[in-house]
């Protein structure tokens, strides 16, 4: 039986594609790459940015770090707010808290931004722990973020009581590497096929599906 629920942020708690894709587009433009298709750039929602710039555009690490720096120029002043909580999320979090679940956030986004977003949308009070990556790349993988959340919650020896909620394959993979279950949501930015291939314990189509699963 689950006691702790860890949530991804982008594509799980908030619909954040606009701010992320426009900031990626800005970064690419600064590097001389014209990418008019914002929908194509939704592949950047969720995974670590550095890896995604390298994988999607064949950048070496040095150029990818420059792209991340350009991305942050726009994201920190504008893109972070081109974002909104999914309908029903606030009510879900309140109901889960009322039922005694311990809630946390484990995101591949830098924790500096994660906390800003949760505060901006008045969601921070629902969470006992908020974890993300580090700006300098010293903690970048999803599994590392989840393990840090487990450590702070003193759940390292009770992983069977923990479940991760996410919308992309790397959420599922990170949870498996960290030794916890993952429930995937199909309303975010990962395709159903992507999620199915990753192998979560369950895929739910909407926020209401999480409500039914846990409550």
Image: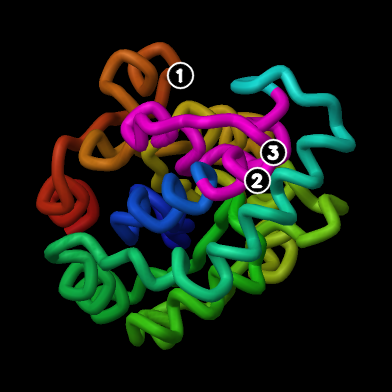
Magenta part of the chain: 26-54
Residue 50 picture location, percent across and down? 72, 39
Mark 3 / mark 1, whichever is N-terminal:
3
> What is the C-alpha distance between the residues marked 2 and 3?
4 Å
Q: Is residue 75 left or right of residue 142?
A: left
Q: Quadrant of the C terminus?
A: bottom left
Residue 79 picture location, percent across and down? 45, 64
What residue did someone put label 1 on? 198
Say which element carries label 1.
Answer: helix
Proximity of marks 2 and 3: CB atoms separated by less than 8 Å: yes
For disc 2, the neighbor class at 10 Å (few under 14, some 14 to 19, many from 20) is some
Q: Residue at x 46, y 30 (%)?
A: 35
What residue did someone put label 3 on? 31
* Quarter assignment of residue 142: top right
Number of marks? 3
What residue did someone put label 2 on? 30
> What is the C-alpha distance between the residues marked 1 and 2?
34 Å
> What is the C-alpha distance between the residues marked 3 and 1?
33 Å
Q: Is residue 157 visible?
A: no
For disc 3, the neighbor class at 10 Å (few under 14, some 14 to 19, many from 20) is some
């Amino acid at each position: 039986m689950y006691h702790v629920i860890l949530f991804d942020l982008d594509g799980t708690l908030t619909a954040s594609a606009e701010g992320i894709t426009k900031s990626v587009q800005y970064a690419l433009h600064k590097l001389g790459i014209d990418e008019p298709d914002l929908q194509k750039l939704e592949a950047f929602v969720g995974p670590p940015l550095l890896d995604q710039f390298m994988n999607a555009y064949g950048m070496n690490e040095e150029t990818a770090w420059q792209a991340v720096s350009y991305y942050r120029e726009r994201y920190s002043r504008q893109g972070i707010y081109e974002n909104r909580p999914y309908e029903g999320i606030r009510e879900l979090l309140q109901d889960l808290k009322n039922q005694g679940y311990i809630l946390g956030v484990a995101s591949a986004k830098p924790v500096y931004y994660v906390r800003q977003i949760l505060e901006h949308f008045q969601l921070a009070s629902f969470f006992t722990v908020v974890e993300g990556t580090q700006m300098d790349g010293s903690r970048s993988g999803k599994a590392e973020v989840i393990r840090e959340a487990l450590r702070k919650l003193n759940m390292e020896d009770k992983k069977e009581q923990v479940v991760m909620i996410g919308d992309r394959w790397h959420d599922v993979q990170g949870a498996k590497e960290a030794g916890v279950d993952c429930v995937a949501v199909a309303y975010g930015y990962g395709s159903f096929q992507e999620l199915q291939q990753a192998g979560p314990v369950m895929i739910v189509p909407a926020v209401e599906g999480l409500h039914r699963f846990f409550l």
